[in-house]
Amino acid sequence: MCSHSDGSLTLWNLRNTTKPFQVTFPHGKIQKDGKKESCKPILKVEYKTSRNSEPFVIFSGGLSYDKAGRRPTLTIMHGKAITVLEMDHPIVEFMVLCDTPYNNEVQEPYAVVVLLEKDLIVVDLTQSNFPVFENPYPMDIHESPVTCTAYFADCPPDIIPILYSIGAKHKKTGYSHKEWPVGGGTWTLGSHTYPEIIITGHADGSIKFWDASAFTLQMLYKLKTSKVFEKPKPGDGRAAELGEEDPFAVQMVSWCPHSRIFCVVGISAHIILYRFSKYEANTQIVSLEVRLQCEPEDIITPSENENNPCFSEQGSYSPQPHHQHPVSPGSRTPDGAKDSVPCLKVRDKMVRVPPGYQSDLVIQLLWVDGEPPQQITSLDINSAYGLLAFGNCNGLAVVDYLQKTVILCISTLDLYGATDPYQRLTRSPRRNRQSTSEHSMRGLSNLYSDSKKRIRTSYQSLTELTDNQQSIDMERSKSPTSELCFQKGKKEKNYPIIYSSYFIVHL
């Protein structure tokens, strides 16, 4: 049997090689004008005999050109039945596994191994529906392009068995019940004494937990974040406005292995908080919408602070946090621009979620005056206090995920603006200490000089009083009120002297 570039198969008799005795077009249909429609080339074909049934004809390619963008296919012909298996990736090579390797004997094929560009699959030929074997190797790490990764070491010892048991219930059905037919090669278990987990986020919004404790990665659990949202309509949402093909792509993850709180940041400026549960639940997803955007009145132009841009009056500006705004879907500004609407729509119906990670809270940033929200660049959770903090280039927000409320929402201008009323200039502690000591010594020297002057003045005053005592007595005898004047003069002259002497003694 031979395969040809026009999508045909020819069967030859080795005793008569002048022409093939059978020519078939497996996927070629007869058109209205009686001609066969053109087909793609058949790149490889294998013909295997069976003792109890008709032979198997297995080939790749050969589809018609009537539809563009078709996936790579593997065709299995068994008698009059034709089965087409579509592959997720281009086919590199395939090989049919038989009971005997000799072509002069009845081969009895039982499986076909297909090597793809990013995967390896094995098809069971012993069953009529041709199921695939469950692959024990993690070949599907790039099933969807990886957009973020996170590594966690020294996790709790019970976390891997729990994730594996939950993930085993979510595996796809329809696999062959037989064991993996490919054998050979041995390896030992990993030498690590502590469990390691790698989390990967993908472009389609899926999350995968991998056991990295051994030499090979073993997928433990898979989570789909797209189930939280409604499917976006064509021409709607951030994907249509910004030309993004994957509105659910995972941008960042944060996980606490001890409390099992898990947060996912998406490219559409959304955060999903998950809680782990071993049981199914009927729940309604709570959504918070945050307006984290610089308002036009908050923007400071250079003309406002031309004279002194770094230091402004504290009373001229007071930071105002941007709190959560009640919104209505589809609200727009008078000029038709989007305003106060999220990029995606959260499902508002009661949904039944399986065991594992269950969505508890969704936080979304809103459009502002026709401008989409900026992507979230940082995220952190504190399960001890029940707080979640996130930020982007426009500001920072802190959410209490236990009470489902926004605690703080502040813009970047309020945090780092030149008009910050709590702004403090950076100073060297050593220089400040030195300047303080110098100021103290200078103050002591000035105090000493002033006290010295006061002592000299007091001494001169005492001398003058002693020399002029007789003149004072003569003045007292002249007037009855002279004693009162003397007492006043004595107080005015002697009080500073006694005070200065007392101060110097204690100093």
Image: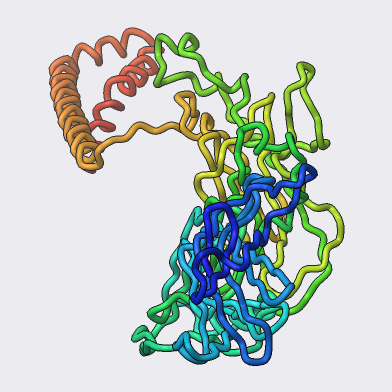
Q: Is residue 232 left or right of residue 490?
A: right
- Can residue 501 be seen in this snapshot? no
Q: Which residue corresponds to the image point at 68% horizontal and 32% vertical from the top-left?
A: 367
Q: Is residue 281 left or right of residue 489?
A: right
Q: Position of residue 195 (x, y in %)?
A: 44, 80
Instruction: Give above or below for 478 relative to 336.
Output: above
From the viewer's side, name the closer residue of 128 and 244.
128
Instruction: Give above or below for 78 relative to 286.
Output: below
Number of numbered tags placed on the structure image = 0
Quadrant (top left, top right, bottom left, bottom right) of the C terminus: top left
Q: Which residue corresponds to the image point at 71% horizontal and 37% vertical from the top-left?
A: 237
Q: Is residue 190 left or right of residue 42?
A: left
From the viewer's side, name the closer residue of 67 and 356.
67
**In which quadrant of the rendered view does residue 111 lie?**
bottom right
- Can residue 297 be seen in this snapshot? yes
Instruction: Give above or below for 403 relative to 110.
Output: above
Residue at the far right in the pictured view? 349
Instruction: Give above or below for 241 relative to 134.
Output: above
From the viewer's side, name the closer residue of 402 and 215.
215
Q: Position of residue 170 (x, y in %)?
A: 68, 75
Q: Is residue 189 left or right of residue 219?
A: left
From the viewer's side, name the closer residue of 128 and 41.
41
Q: Position of residue 80 (x, y in %)?
A: 74, 73
Q: Position of residue 303 (x, y in %)?
A: 47, 9
Q: Which residue corresponds to the image point at 76% horizontal and 47% vertical from the top-left?
A: 34
Q: Which residue corresponds to the image point at 28% horizontal and 32% vertical from the top-left?
A: 499
Coloration mode: rainbow
**In which quadrant of the rendered view does residue 175 lie?**
bottom right
